[in-house]
Amino acid sequence: MNFNATLIGQMITFGLLVLFTMKYVWPPIIQAMQDRQKRIADGLASAERGMREQELAKVKAAQLLKEAKQQAAEIVAQAHKRANEVIEQSKLDARTEGDRQLAAAKAEIEQEANRAREQLRHQVVSLAIAGAGKILRREVDEAANAALLDDLVAQL
Amino acid sequence: MSETGHSMTGYIVHHLTNLRFDLTEMHFLHGEETGGFGVIHLDTLLFSVGLGALFLWLFMKAAKTATSDVPGPLQNFCEIMVEFVDTQVKDSFHGRNPVIAPLALTIFVWVFLWNAMDLLPVDLLPSIAGLLGIPYLRSVPSTDLNSTFGMSISVLLLVYYYSIKVKGPIHFTMEILTHPFGKWFMPFNLLLRIVEDLAKPISLGLRLFGNLYAGELIFILIALLPWWVQFTLGWPWAVFHILIITLQAFIFMVLTIVYLSMAHEDH
């Protein structure tokens, strides 16, 4: 239980141990720990950021969806309107066309009727002349009476 | 009866005797022989150097492969120790000093390993040594006053070194002479300071030594009981001792940090 040179030996050992710990043990371990701490902090921060961004994206997506729906509704409404317009226009066109065609047909009918009447008149005249010719075969000079007949035709 | 008593005393004394080597006369000391300051305790030195090497080997192995990725078990363990010590240092020391934290780690782990030798059966290592022809062996370095005081005196030297380095020689001298009672009580202040600074290493060294010496002595006494009752006392004492060895290492470390942080601060 005496103090002796062991004391000095222990002090030297202690000093060397501290020196080695200071140089080779402490710095790498504490460095690794600090690096990891930083990485974890960074990771947490980026996770936080990601979550916030996702939140924003959600809001944005909802907004876009709403806009799209609104646009679609507008387009549908416009299409309905346009369809109605087209139908109305078509009805109008059809009616006009019908009227036009009706008028044309009526005109044609009139024309045909006129032509038939003319023809009939000519035939009646020819028939009358033929009848009269048969009756007046001898006395009536066709050439002398042609002017008279034409006058008659014009009067019919 | 007296024969048994004598052998018991012999057993205890044998267990409490170091393997001594006199450097001045270059021979081993036996029995009751006492040497001067030139004697060294080979067992104390051997075990403390060996345990120190074990500590350095473990931690340097971890430090060499230290990564900020997922740590392995060894690195994890070392990081827990480092972080524990670092927290203690940061709690009581607010300056910047690259020595204190590694110093505290060394003290904590080294003293813990010293103390942990106490948990080995008291007869194990001395018996093996006896078979090898070594007459005396004490395996717990912290039951040797030279170990505990070697460390506490080193701490005191560091305290002085940093006091002078941080405060400057003049300011430090002024502090010694004028605190705590002002400049008119210079001799008294000086006396108080001497007592204070003597108390530091003595309390540090004696506390560790006393606890571990007493612990070892009780293990030796338990070993003197009949073998079939030894475990009834030995087991609880060993469990309790796990607390003691950790606590003493912790106290030594914390007081070192506190003394060194006082050296950095103005009173």
Image (cartoon, coloured by chain):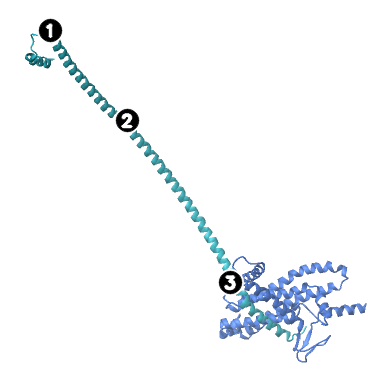
Subunit under mark 2:
A
Q: How many marks?
A: 3
Instruction: State the quadrant of the C terminus of chain A.
Output: top left
Which image quarter: residue B68? Answer: bottom right
Q: Nearer the viewer, residue B255 or A28?
A: A28
Q: Position of residue A106 (x, y in %)?
A: 24, 23
Q: Which residue is labeled 3 in the image?
A: A31
Spatial CA distance of label 3 from label 2 is: 87 Å
Q: CA distance from mark 1 to mark 3?
A: 148 Å
Q: Is residue B212 visible in this depiction of the protein?
A: yes
| Viewer-nearest residue: B226 or A113 | A113
Judging from the image, mark 3 belongs to the subunit labelled A
Element under label 1?
Answer: helix
Q: Residue A46: image x %, image y %?
A: 52, 60
Of marks 1 and 2, the one in the foreground? 1
| Earlier residue among tags 1 and 2 | 2
- The outermost residue toward the bottom is B25
Residue A17 left/right relative to A144 = right
Residue A115: % across, % down = 19, 20
* Three-letter amino acid code of the residue under disc 3: Gln
Q: Who's the residue at 83% across and 86% down the image?
A: B30
Q: Nearer the viewer, residue B169 or B145?
A: B145
Name the residue that disc number 1 marks. A135
- Which element is circle 3 on? helix
Q: Earlier in the sequence, mark 1 or mark 3?
A: 3
